[in-house]
Amino acid sequence: MPKPPDFHGTTFVKQLLLELSLDRAALQQAENPQAFALATQPLWAHLDQLHTHLWRNGKPFPVNARARAGAQVVANFLLSAEAQARKADISVWGDGTVLDIGKIPAPLQATMRTTAPGALTERVPTLAEPHASWVEALEAEWLKRYGSR
């Protein structure tokens, strides 16, 4: 797992916060020190415990690809309509797309609308993101607690 403030690291921490929070409504409000301290207690307790099970006790975290241009080519391909259609094909993978189906070429739309036998027919429930002001506070606190271990 990349560490915050890398997008994926921060997203992981936000997801944990949402899952562990006892008061999700507070996360929809602008961050303030008192609410932050209260809402993040379960998060830090969970991460403290988790770090003991991570590679090298969670001291090092992977960094971004050294070949940034190459990584961007791969990411762009994986997000292309063609690659997403292939992934959605039930004979290949059968996973839904991350793309807005209405915005991709019509010939690829049919492939993405086919569902695999036994697949969920409804969208998976999602949790609302915390208020944007929580991101900087979460990243700063994560770095303070775990960034220089």
Image (spheres, rainbow, N blue to C red):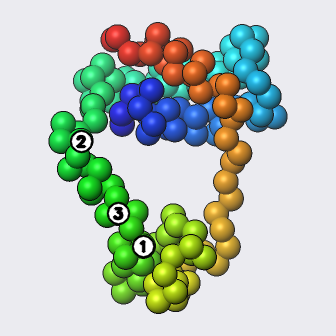
On the image, numbered disc 3 is attached to which residue?
Answer: 78
Question: x and y percent of residue 63 in the render?
Answer: 27, 31
Please name whichever residue, 120 or 140, is drawn nearer the observer in this view of the structure: 140
Quadrant the N terminus occupies: top left
**Which quadrant holds residue 125?**
bottom right
Q: Secondary structure at mark 2?
A: helix
Amino acid at circle 3: Leu
Residues at marks 1 and 3, CA–CA distance in whole angstroms: 8 Å
Please name whichever residue, 29 or 24, is drawn nearer the observer in this view of the structure: 29
Question: Would residue 145 be visible to someone looking at this image?
Answer: yes
Q: Earlier in the sequence, mark 2 or mark 3?
A: 2
Question: x and y percent of residue 80 in the render?
Answer: 39, 68
x 39%, y 28%: residue? 3
**Which quadrant holds residue 146?**
top left
Q: Earlier in the sequence, mark 1 or mark 2?
A: 2
Question: x and y percent of residue 109 in the render?
Answer: 52, 84
On the image, numbered disc 1 is attached to which residue?
Answer: 81
Residues at marks 2 and 3, CA–CA distance in whole angstroms: 15 Å
x 67%, y 73%: residue? 122
How many neighbours does mark 3 have within 10 angstroms: few (below 14), some (14-19), or many (20 or more)? some
Q: Quick check: marks 1 and 3 in contact, CB under 8 Å?
A: no
x 81%, y 34%: residue? 25
Q: Nearer the viewer, mark 2 or mark 3?
A: 2
On the image, numbered disc 2 is attached to which residue?
Answer: 68
Question: Would residue 94 be visible to someone looking at this image?
Answer: no
Residues at marks 1 and 2, CA–CA distance in whole angstroms: 22 Å
Question: x and y percent of residue 100 in the render?
Answer: 58, 69
Amino acid at circle 2: Arg
x 30%, y 28%: residue? 61
Amino acid at circle 1: Ala
